[in-house]
């Protein structure tokens, strides 16, 4: 298995997700929220987070791609699937698994701002600031992590490992040495 070192346990994630949900509930009290999940990486975080948010929530998804099967961003972000609903006049909260170079979220914010939402904020579970190529700063952040490629809890390497219940550091060399398939 190429992803053996646990960086964040199930328990740590669960407790931090609950805290984020409480902050979001407090900040949006009395308002309806449109939660926009960025597919595919955000799906587990979003599913857990929305169940800790106690204001009316509508959920929509957008799919973008820049990494493909690589551990380095291609630098080019494309929309693969757009939102189903207009967000004009809505309080929009983008939910994402990780901000790394910042290219994906910088692009998402730019695209959504043009649709004139009432408010637009971004919640990420993980922030890897060491590799940033844009000035992007999330409004809500679960954990700041070191410059390692991580998998699990929705995050993948070449489509795999999203189902791991914790977040682990991908160890490619070890995987090769042990006859892994990377
Ligand atoms: O800050 P950045 O350098 O842009 O990287 C972050 C983005 O990269 C990953 O998605 P990816 O494009 O690999 O697709 P996925 O969500 O389907 O895994 C991750 O889920 C974020 O969306
Ligand atoms: O560390 C990462 N893991 C998985 N997907 C990612 N996309 C950007 N950074 C990462
Ligand atoms: Mg993603």
Image: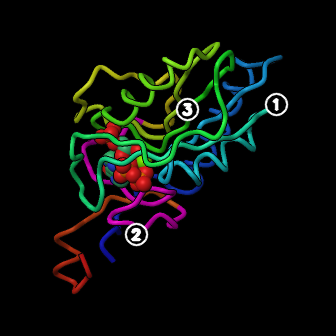
Which of the 4 quarters of the picture holds residue 61? Answer: top right
Disc 2/disc 1 C-alpha distance (Å)? 33 Å
Which of the 4 quarters of the picture holds residue 172? Answer: bottom left
Q: Main secondary structure of the magenta part?
A: loop
Asked if residue 164 lies left or right of residue 66, the reply is: right
Counting from the top left corner in percent of width and height, residue 72 is at 21, 50
Asked if residue 166 lies left or right of residue 3, the reply is: right
Examine the structure image and report whether residue 62 is included in the region drawn in magenta. Answer: no
Callouts 2 and 1 close, C-beta under 8 Å: no
Relative vertical location of residue 43 with respect to residue 136 in this rendering, above or below: below
Q: How is the image coloured?
A: rainbow
Task: Tell me what residue is drawn at x 20 percent, y 73 percent.
Answer: 174
Counting from the top left corner in percent of width and height, residue 106 is at 37, 27
Residue on which disc 2 sits:
160
Counting from the top left corner in percent of width and height, residue 75 is at 22, 40
Of helix, strand and loop, which one carries label 3? strand
Mark 2: is the Cβ under 8 angstroms from ligand 1?
no
Residue 95, numbered circle: none
User: Quarter holding the C terminus?
Assistant: bottom left
Which of the 4 quarters of the picture holds residue 25? Answer: top right
Residue on which disc 3 sits:
94
Q: Residues within 10 Å of mark 2 (few under 14, many from 20)?
A: few
Residue on which disc 1 sits:
56
Asked if residue 124 lies left or right of residue 18, the reply is: left
N-terminal of the pair, mark 3 or mark 2, is 3
Counting from the top left corner in percent of width and height, residue 123 is at 53, 31
Q: Residues within 10 Å of mark 1 (few under 14, many from 20)?
A: some
Disc 3/disc 1 C-alpha distance (Å)? 15 Å
Task: Tell me what residue is drawn at x 32 percent, y 66 percent.
Answer: 158
For the record, the magenta segment spans 144-165
């Amino acid at each position: 298995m190429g992803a053996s070192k646990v960086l964040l346990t199930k328990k740590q994630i669960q407790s931090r997700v609950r805290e984020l949900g409480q902050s979001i509930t407090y900040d949006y009290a009395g308002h309806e929220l449109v939660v926009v999940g960025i597919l595919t990486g955000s799906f587990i975080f979003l599913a857990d987070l929305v169940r800790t948010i106690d204001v009316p929530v509508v959920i929509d998804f957008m799919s973008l791609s820049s990494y493909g099967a690589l551990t380095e961003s291609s630098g080019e972000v494309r929309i693969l699937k757009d939102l189903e609903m207009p967000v004009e006049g809505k309080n929009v909260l983008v939910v994402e698994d990780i901000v790394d170079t910042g290219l994906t979220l910088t692009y998402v914010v730019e695209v959504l701002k043009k649709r004139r939402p009432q408010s637009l904020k971004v919640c990420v579970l993980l922030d890897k600031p060491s590799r940033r190529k844009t000035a992007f700063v999330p409004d809500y952040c679960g954990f700041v992590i070191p410059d390692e490629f991580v998998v699990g809890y929705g995050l993948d390497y070449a489509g795999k490992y999203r189902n791991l219940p914790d977040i682990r550091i991908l160890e490619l060399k070890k995987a090769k040495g042990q006859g892994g398939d990377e």
